[in-house]
Image (cartoon, rainbow, N blue to C red):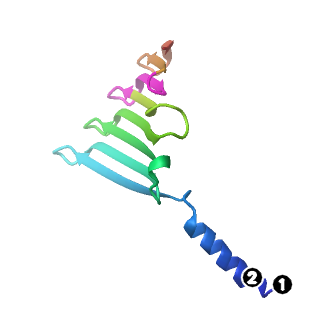
């Protein structure tokens, strides 16, 4: 039995290096500042692609997170976009888009969520205390 372990490990390594299901991810963060040194905007990008490119089965997924801040340090808006290229998964380019807007005290004012190329849109508006006042759902 112990003699088979090196053979099993070798077979496992060969199959994991030859498979086309492995992906590689690029992650980047960009920060912008106000002239007084406070944080203005943070942009986070994550791009996932297959390690081995096949023109018939190409897939690319991008997640973009943007956070903007007021000069006093409170959050101004938060945005997330998920987009993809390829034939796998749902048949749309922009899979998810979400945006939230806040006032200068950091209380949410409105939010909008779009699903699959704006086929379904959720819109919400809030009062000055952050309580939900209006909610709508629109479909194509």
Which residue shows up at 31% across the image and 37% down it? Answer: 68
Residue 65, horizontal then vertical, whole percent = 39, 41
Label 1: which secondary element: loop
For the residue pair 49 and 97, the one nearer the viewer reads as 49
Task: Give the number of callouts.
Answer: 2
Q: CA distance from mark 2 to mark 1?
A: 7 Å
Residue at x 39%, y 34% (from the top left corner): 79
Would residue 13 be found to the left or right of residue 87 on screen?
right
Query: Of residues 46 and 83, which is closer to you in this image?
Result: 83
Residue at the extreme left: 35
Observer-nearest of 105 and 28 = 28
Q: Name the foreground residue: 26 vs 75.
A: 26
Give residue 97's position: percent from left, percent from top: 43, 31
Can you say which quadrant of the picture contains the N terminus?
bottom right
Residue 119 is tagged as none
Horizontal side of 25 relative to 21 (left or right) equals left
Residue 109 vs 83, above or below: the answer is above
- Which residue is denoted by mark 2 in the rendering? 5
- The reply to whether callout 2 and callout 1 are in contact (CB within 8 Å) is yes
Please state the horizontal and vertical placement of residue 87, each as a whole percent of the image.
50, 39
At 67% across and 75% down in the image, what residue appears? Answer: 11
Q: Is residue 37 above or below residue 131?
A: below
- Estimate how packed mark 1 is, as few (under 14), some (14 to 19) or many (20 or more) residues with alpha carbons within 10 Å: few
- Residue 1, numbered circle: 1
- 10 drawn magenta: no
The region drawn magenta spans 101-118
On screen, residue 60 versus residue 17, left or right, reads: left
């Amino acid at each position: 039995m112990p003699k088979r372990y090196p053979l099993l490990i070798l077979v496992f390594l060969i199959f994991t290096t030859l498979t086309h299901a492995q992906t590689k991810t690029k992650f980047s963060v960009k920060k912008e500042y106000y002239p007084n040194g406070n944080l203005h905007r943070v942009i986070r990008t994550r791009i996932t692609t297959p390690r081995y490119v096949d023109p018939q089965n190409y897939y690319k997924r991008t997640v973009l997170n943007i956070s903007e801040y007021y000069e006093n340090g409170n959050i101004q808006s938060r945005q997330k976009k998920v987009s993809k290229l390829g034939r796998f998964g749902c048949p749309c380019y922009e899979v998810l888009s979400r945006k939230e807007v806040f006032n200068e005290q950091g209380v949410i004012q409105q939010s909008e969520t779009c699903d699959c190329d704006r086929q379904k849109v959720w819109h919400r508006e809030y009062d000055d205390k952050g309580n939900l006042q209006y909610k709508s759902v629109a479909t194509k």
